[in-house]
Image: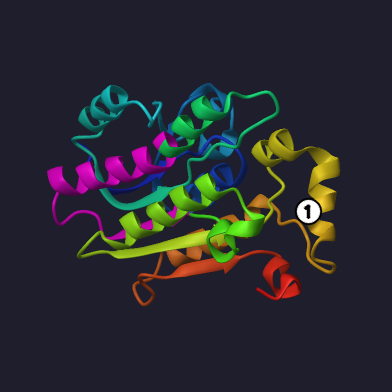
Amino acid sequence: MNISKKVLIIGGTSGISLEVARLFSVTREVVIIGRNITKISSDQVLKSALKFSCDIADRQQREELLCQLKSFHIDTIIHCAGIFQTQGQNKSTYEKAYQGVKLGGVEIIRERMRSHPEEVKNVCAISSVYTFLPDSIVPKFEKGVQEELEREIFSLSGIVANCVAPGLVNTPLTRAAYGEDDMKEILSLAPGSRMLEPMEVAREIYELSNQQEISGKVILVDGDFLKFLAV
């Protein structure tokens, strides 16, 4: 049985989550969950990481995953999984999947804490800049799910628990959801703000997950977007 302490990264195959996995892999043993884990099979930085395929929105797959992880000692969990709606995607299907991914990750955390009490010490989840914005300018469903994610993370007792709320980030998911023209239009709403690179957000998550002083906070990483919107 391998009892060395590990970092569990929910998501970890692209964008912010991939950079988080790479950062942690330098100093820690990393366990990565992803729907399409083959995307990182040839990543040399993550060659020693333990990789598991799982659709975290699916309850049965979550249960099977937790059984696979039963013997691992996991003291840090990073919830990075997320999806974006793309053009032509069915709205109701998307909303169900979006909620399933965000809150399915929380269920993995809760079940892990129930089955392995006293092990998990630090949890960090990616939320969204949406939770800082008024309903009039953001998708209400997505904002509601992100707010629920934050509440669920902060309700975890006996651990350090925080969320990081990024603004517009230059990831494959963002580009697929918005396209270059729409991203430029969004940034034009806040002159002087900028699009973030995945590594910038990943560094914040990494630092936040390696300390014990800050807990119960939503840390905004937005490229000055809210500053120029005067929110």
Horizontal and vertical percent position of residue 164: 50, 61
Q: Is residue 178 left or right of residue 6?
A: right
- Residue visible at 33% across and 45% down in the picture: 106
Q: Is residue 227 left or right of residue 216?
A: right
When the figure is inspected, residue 70 is found, relative to residue 58, above or below; the finding is below
Q: Which of the image's four quarters has the C terminus?
A: bottom right
Which class describes the residues within 10 Å of circle 1: few (<14), some (14-19), or many (20+)?
Answer: some
Can residue 3 be seen here? no
Q: Amino acid at mark 1?
A: Ile
Horizontal and vertical percent position of residue 170: 72, 47
Q: Nearer the viewer, residue 124 or 31?
A: 124
Horizontal and vertical percent position of residue 88: 68, 23
SS at mark 1? helix
Q: Nearer the viewer, residue 93 or 126?
A: 93
- Residue visible at 35% across and 71% down in the picture: 215
Q: Label 1 belongs to which residue?
A: 186
Horizontal and vertical percent position of residue 206: 49, 60
- Residue visible at 38% across and 30% down in the picture: 57
Q: Which of the image's four quarters has the N terminus?
A: top left
Q: Residue furthest front?
A: 136
Q: Which residues are magenta?
A: 100-126
Can residue 39 be seen here? yes
When the figure is inspected, residue 159 is found, relative to residue 198, above or below; the finding is below
Q: Nearer the viewer, residue 4 or 223?
A: 223
Disc count in the image?
1
When the figure is inspected, residue 184 is found, relative to residue 47, above or below; the finding is below
Asked whether 102 falls inside the magenta stretch, the response is yes
